[in-house]
Image (cartoon, helix red, strand yellow):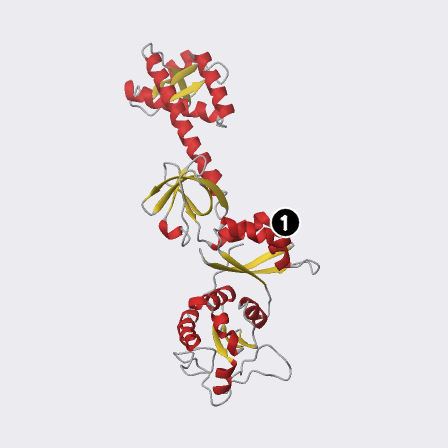
Amino acid sequence: MNKELIEALNILEKEKDISKESLFEAIENNLVVAYKNNFNKADNVTVTMDRETGDFHIYSQKEVVEEVMDPVTEISLEDARSIKGTYELGDIVNIEIQSKDFGRIATQSAKNGILQKIREEERKSLYEQYFEKQDDIVTGIVQRINGKNISVNLGKVDTVLMEKEQAKGEHFRPTERIKLYITEVKDNGRGPRIVVSRTHPGLVKRLFEQEVTEIQDGTVEIKSIAREAGSRTKMAVWSNNEDVDAVGACVGVNGARVNAVVDELRDEKIDIVNWSENPAILIENALSPSKVVAVLADPDNKEALVVVPDFQLSLAIGKEGQNARLAAKLTGFKIDIKSESQAKEEGIQYLFDDDEYYDDEYYDDEYDAEYDDEYYDDEYDSESEADSEESEEVTEETSEATTEETEE
């Protein structure tokens, strides 16, 4: 049995990357428990196992005393010196326990110890493996559709892509390969519990990192991402090398790089703009593809007034307010968009001789500096009545928009 045991431990160490020493310790602990349960309830029993041969020995540890009160835990000085003449009072003597009946129990206990340790080490290894991938992407295979949730196999563990973490309009089939963003890895005692998402902005960030070598080597940085999963993403990028165009690097030759990300996101639209430390320039870039006449930004209060050409108002706001809403999330500013006609009607001064982008005093005396509940009048001069209705709807939404940046 001992020879086979050593061979089995060697195989386990090699194939499952489990330390043989940890397996020996697990076996020893199980043998102690097994002996106590079957022969002796005392806590002074130890087991040692030879790492080369697999032979084990059971010892009862007893303290050397003048007068024995508890023979299970104590031994007289005379008896101790009959074993070894150098023992003194207070020493601990290991007395080997011989039991013919313990062989079968020991074998079963060793087996249980090995199996238990293997399970523990495999759970620990899996947890550590996937914990390292937290805030990163993994590829999984769709197993089955459970109502509105999707069971996905990640290779060594299964997880569930919940409905709230699925992008709008996405549909999956069994055996299909999909990429997922790991938002959290928990240890529930039975193995890792992995929380995954297809809606997190980090998914877009990691996909671009995979596609764009300039991001991988640190030349280009992704500064901020605002996303409405399944519909549109805005991403602000910055180049640490003036000779490298950050936006161009992310787009790639003939759009190859951005298209690879778009394909993975099932045709989600992606706007890539240049980042700027100047909030007015950043806001102007964020409102792309709309043209901007002026941006009057208040960095302290994180508020900005944007004036756009009358015919660009609808484009600046976007369908159902999406363009303005994403721009607000990308920049962290509450953005109030007005047409040139409306700005003139309200007496807003936005042309400066010094050509600065923003000024804290961007309202004249006739206009209340506090924003009104309604950001737009119903009767301003625009391309269509639809523009007016849409502008009222979006500004209420964008006024509450908050920054949504990806973690580094």
387 or 368: nearer the eye? 387
Quadrant of the rendering where the C terminus is positioned? bottom right
238 or 122: nearer the eye? 238
What residue is at 45 percent from the left and 22 percent from the top? Answer: 24
88 or 96: nearer the eye? 96
Dot 1: what SS? helix
Seen as rendered, the residue at the extreme top is 100
What residue is at 34 percent from the left and 21 percent from the top? Answer: 74
327 left or right, relative to 172: right
Counting from the top left corner in percent of width and height, residue 310 is at 51, 78
Q: Is residue 234 visible?
A: yes
Counting from the top left corner in percent of width and height, residue 88 is at 43, 20
The quarter of the picture where residue 144 lies is: top left
What residue is shown with label 1?
Answer: 213
Seen as rendered, the residue at the extreme right is 243
Is 300 situated above or below 346?
above
Is 358 situated above or below 208?
below
Seen as rendered, the residue at the extreme front is 384
- Tell me the kind of residue under disc 1: Thr
Quadrant of the rendering where the N terminus is positioned? top left
Q: Is residue 65 visible?
A: no
Counting from the top left corner in percent of width and height, residue 158 is at 40, 38
Q: Residues within 10 Å of mark 1 (few under 14, many from 20)?
A: some
Counting from the top left corner in percent of width and height, residue 388 is at 42, 77
377 left or right, relative to 299: left
